[in-house]
């Protein structure tokens, strides 16, 4: 088959790699435009574009999905099927109806649960024990199309958004190839989703990372894991009359003492962790990153900073 692949971040790379190794022909790749990155804000190509260029596959980077010039170029590739993985754009009807065999999406959840842009992160944040990959026929809705194949994997207690995403990317690549095999063999049996069972996984924003210490410690530990590496969970501390932002990278709900005091209060300082009172139980912080500094263990941070019980963590003070 002639395949056009649409994808952007690292999650999509294994799927494109698998298609490039397959017996089918990847005739073109569509990805998002280059974006400024890092402190220097220099333009950086998406990971999918980098792989496509190394592999000699032509690339399109439209700013608008309905741009006539883009649609004409896409049509000229004459795809039998369009494969999509974490592309990050809504496909208009003109694209959905273009390939004879449809548009197939690799989605990072067990649909109909967690429709949307951040299914992997929200599954961890919400304390799920398993998740998986669903391949589906795309329609005009947000992950509402008929399901094709699914594969579930457990969410391990130490999984983060980053580590779980890397695992699911490999599962997605394998399932995409199997979906293509069954598509050619006429073996696929699309299953209409039960829309009544659907849940949403909206796009993550930086403000999702601000820790609400009134939540239970177990929920906060899940949030820290789910928001790593981006946008990261964070809080603020007043140190020597200065407000310092801390990114919290590793934390666990504590079964021991340390939950006394108002939520956000550091109730106990140990050599390798800070126990913080929450709405229910205590959160044991074991790795953090001060603003402008590097990620470090709490033991490393305490070697250079005097932290005492009673320090209250929370949102930044209101301006004015």
Image: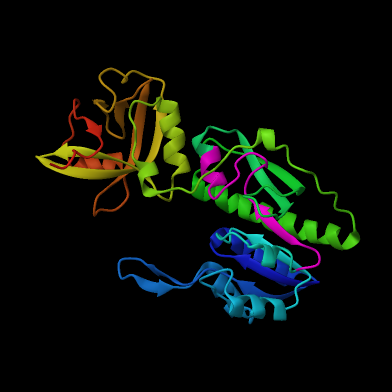
Q: Can residue 54 be seen in this view?
A: no
In the image, what residue occupies the spot 71% across and 66% down?
82
Q: Residue furthest left?
A: 241
In the image, what residue occupies the spot 65% across and 80% down?
73
Q: Can residue 316 be seen in this view?
A: yes
Q: Where is residue 122 in the image (x, y as percent from the top left)?
A: 52, 40
Q: Where is residue 56 in the image (x, y as percent from the top left)?
A: 63, 82
In the image, what residue occupies the spot 50% across and 50% down?
162
Against 36, residue 273 (above or below) is above
From the viewer's side, name the closer residue of 132 and 78. Answer: 78
Q: In this view, does 100 lie to the left or right of 318?
A: right
From the viewer's side, name the closer residue of 252 and 6. Answer: 6
Q: Quadrant of the N terminus?
A: bottom right
Q: In this view, does 67 lie to the left or right of 135?
A: left
- Is 288 part of what is drawn in magenta? no
From the viewer's side, name the closer residue of 298 and 24. Answer: 24
User: Which of the 4 image quarters holds residue 193?
Assistant: top right
Q: In this view, does 33 lie to the left or right of 242?
A: right
- Is 121 part of what is drawn in magenta? yes
Q: Where is residue 115 in the image (x, y as percent from the top left)?
A: 60, 44
In the image, what residue occupies the spot 72% across and 45% down?
151
The main secondary structure of the magenta stretch is: loop
User: Which of the 4 image quarters holds residue 282?
Assistant: top left
Q: Where is residue 289 in the image (x, y as percent from the top left)?
A: 29, 47
Query: Which range of residues does the magenta coloring cover?
Result: 99-123
User: Which of the 4 image quarters holds residue 234?
Assistant: top left
Q: Quadrant of the C terminus?
A: top left
């Amino acid at each position: 088959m002639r395949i056009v692949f649409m994808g952007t971040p690292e999650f999509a790379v294994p799927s494109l790699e698998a298609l490039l190794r397959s017996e089918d022909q990847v005739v073109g790749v569509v990805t998002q435009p280059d974006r400024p990155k890092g402190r220097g804000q220099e333009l950086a190509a998406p990971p999918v574009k980098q792989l496509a260029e190394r592999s000699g596959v032509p690339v399109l980077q439209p700013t608008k999905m309905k741009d006539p010039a883009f649609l004409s170029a896409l049509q000229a590739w004459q795809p039998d099927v369009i494969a999509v993985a974490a592309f990050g754009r809504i496909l208009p009807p003109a694209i959905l109806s273009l390939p004879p065999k449809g548009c197939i999406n690799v989605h990072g959840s067990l649909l109909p649960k967690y429709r949307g842009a951040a299914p992997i992160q929200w599954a961890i944040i919400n304390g799920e024990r398993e998740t998986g990959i669903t391949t589906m026929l795309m329609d005009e809705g947000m992950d509402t199309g008929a399901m094709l194949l699914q594969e579930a994997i457990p969410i391990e207690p130490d999984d983060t958004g980053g580590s779980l995403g890397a695992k699911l990317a490999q599962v997605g690549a394998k399932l995409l190839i199997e979906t293509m095999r069954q598509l050619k063999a006429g073996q696929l049996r699309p299953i209409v989703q039960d829309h009544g069972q659907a849940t949403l996984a909206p796009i993550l924003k930086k403000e999702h990372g601000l820790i609400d210490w009134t939540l239970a410690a177990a929920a906060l530990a899940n949030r820290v894991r789910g928001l790593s590496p981006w946008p990261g969970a964070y809080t603020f501390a007043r140190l020597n009359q200065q407000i310092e932002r801390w990114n919290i990278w590793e934390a666990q709900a504590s079964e021991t003492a340390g939950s006394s005091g108002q939520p956000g209060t550091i109730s106990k300082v140990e050599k390798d962790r800070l126990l913080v009172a929450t709405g229910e139980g205590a959160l044991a912080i074991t790795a953090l990153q001060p603003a402008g500094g590097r990620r470090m263990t709490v033991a490393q941070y305490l070697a250079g900073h005097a932290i005492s019980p009673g320090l209250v963590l929370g949102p930044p003070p209101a301006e004015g």
